[in-house]
Image (cartoon, helix red, strand yellow):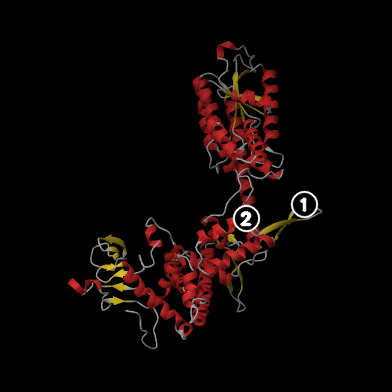
Amino acid sequence: MTAMLEKVVDKTARPSLASRRPRSNATTKQWVGVKYLRASQDAQGYSISVQSQLDEGEEFFEEHGIGDGGVFCDNDISASVYATEERPDYEAALNEIRSGRANLLWFFDASRGQRDLEVFGRVRRILIEVGGALAYNGRVFDMNDPNDRKSTSRDAVEAENFIDTLVINVRRGVRKRAKSGQHAGPLAYGYTRVYSPETGKSLGWVINWEQAKTIRRIVRWCLELKALGWIARRLNEEGVPCARDGKWTRATVHKLAELYQHPKQWRAFLATLEPEARPVAQRAVALVESGESFKGAAKLLNADGVPYVVPSKWDTTKVRNIALSKAAAGIRIHHGQEHMVKVPDGNGGLKMVAVKAAWSPIIRRSEHVQLSAILRAPERQRNANTERLEHLWSGNATCGTCGRGLGRGSSKDGPRYRCPKGHVSRQYDALHAYLLEFALRTLERPDAAEIFRLKTSKDEAAQAEKYAEKLRAELAMWQADAAAGEVSRESFRAIEPGLLERIRQAEAAARRVRVPAVLENMTGVNAREAFARLDIEGQRAVVRTIMRPVIGPSATRGKNAKVMDTSTIDPGLLYDLPEDTPVAA
């Protein structure tokens, strides 16, 4: 690979057309060629594939007396019509042809250059304009020869057709796996793959009990309304291995390769690593420098069991992703949605049901519904106004005049809760104490559990979720019938909006399960102590669940202005009380 690297890197030392005397190939033309190498991801590995292509190219050039115009390599980048990444070295090779420094473009075979007819057409035009040629499969094809143009066009069609057929087969396999509930994509946190001892093929996922224990802790904490930041800190303090800890990815290898381009930054980075990690970082960069792709280097390092040089840490995003993991909840996703299939309904018809995952869930479906409601609720979303997360009633209490959320302000008399339009301004400590005492006395009531109807809320939410699932299945059936042409486009358009609205309403009802999830351990004689143990984010969620205070302008003026005027304060309790609840003045 070192010899190959020297050839790839030294792209400036290319001969001009006049400095070479290549033999003609069935014509009197003299060729100076550029070699283009490309290897897609395969079981054999990238470096071997690229080196094989380079060896073949050198032999071909020597045999036909072709001048060497340089080597270009785009490793592990697709050349098909489905490609999403640019191929910088491919464009550089074409620029050599356009500039006149070379007049022949060599590939190992036709598919190495492109599997897209549109790209082939562009290459062909360039070569025709400069009087150039394509070379692959041991032949030189002069693009000014009609027979050679026909041959290369046929090969280009076959190359594109190959990838089209491959895509069709892959998609068929993906649909089959989805229908059978088998896993797809990378291994989900909480699971381990098991393999057949006879064939070495994957037999599926089984629960990794150590990771599952961490998932269950995250679920419990989220249902208790612990802040995601608090959960991440707790896991990091305990030294719990992070999701995907130690795994190399394309991005991590790329990051090291970028640092390596700047010696000062690279030395500073190495100084931050543990002594045993420094040779690993050097090895990762060496793989890239030897021609390995970022993906290929990551694959090799992971296959050798080499951990990433910087240990991963838990953060709020990782905690949230684990809590909302559909894989951990046993939900099989296909095209971004839970996969549904048609089954007999017992009455001679068909119905849509969710596919049963082939692996065991770690998170119960009912918990997944609760977690989705809690973590996607507005009060859990961070926004640019971080002040709202620091003060209990900011945003939770609203102005009685304009309805806008109150925020914290200041004055010569101290901090205040204020309407952004200036309609209301209340002394911060007094309003905070008044509303908090109302909330705590309500939660402490002996009949609080009855007031908040915890069991009823759970049952209703579960029923709403089942109804939403039924509606989603019905929509999936309509979509399948429309795709199969069994339902007209007009009929589907007429039905879809109503179904989507009913699904939205049912999902909204199901999300109400977050109320009992918050309050189950927050009512009765221990409510005050339980509330005090919550962080500010949890406390805000609790008070927002039970009340939405509306604050009007104070009626007191002059000497009485320092006395809290409660006559224009509506605590905004969201539940009906059997009798009045006194609050502190």
Give 62 or 260, whichever is nearer the viewer: 260
Q: Is residue 269 above or below residue 360?
A: above
The amino acid beneath tag 2 is: Gly
Residue 239 is tagged as 2
Which structural element holds mark 1?
A: loop
Distance, label 2 to label 1, CA atoms, is 34 Å
Q: Decide if residue 330 is in sight here.
A: no
Residue 575, given in percent of the width and then of the height, sits at 40, 81
Residue 297 is tagged as none
- In terms of image quadrants, where is residue 365? bottom right
Give 582 or 457, whichever is nearer the viewer: 582
Q: Residue at x 23, y 66 (%)?
A: 423
Q: Residue furthest left?
A: 558
Q: Residue furthest right?
A: 198
Q: In which quadrant will I find the N terminus?
A: top right
Residue 524, given in percent of the width and then of the height, sits at 49, 81
Q: Nearer the viewer, mark 2 or mark 1?
A: 2
Q: Is residue 413 above or below residue 86?
A: below
Residue 200 is tagged as 1
Q: Decide if residue 33 is in sight here.
A: yes
Q: Residue at x 68, y 42 (%)?
A: 301
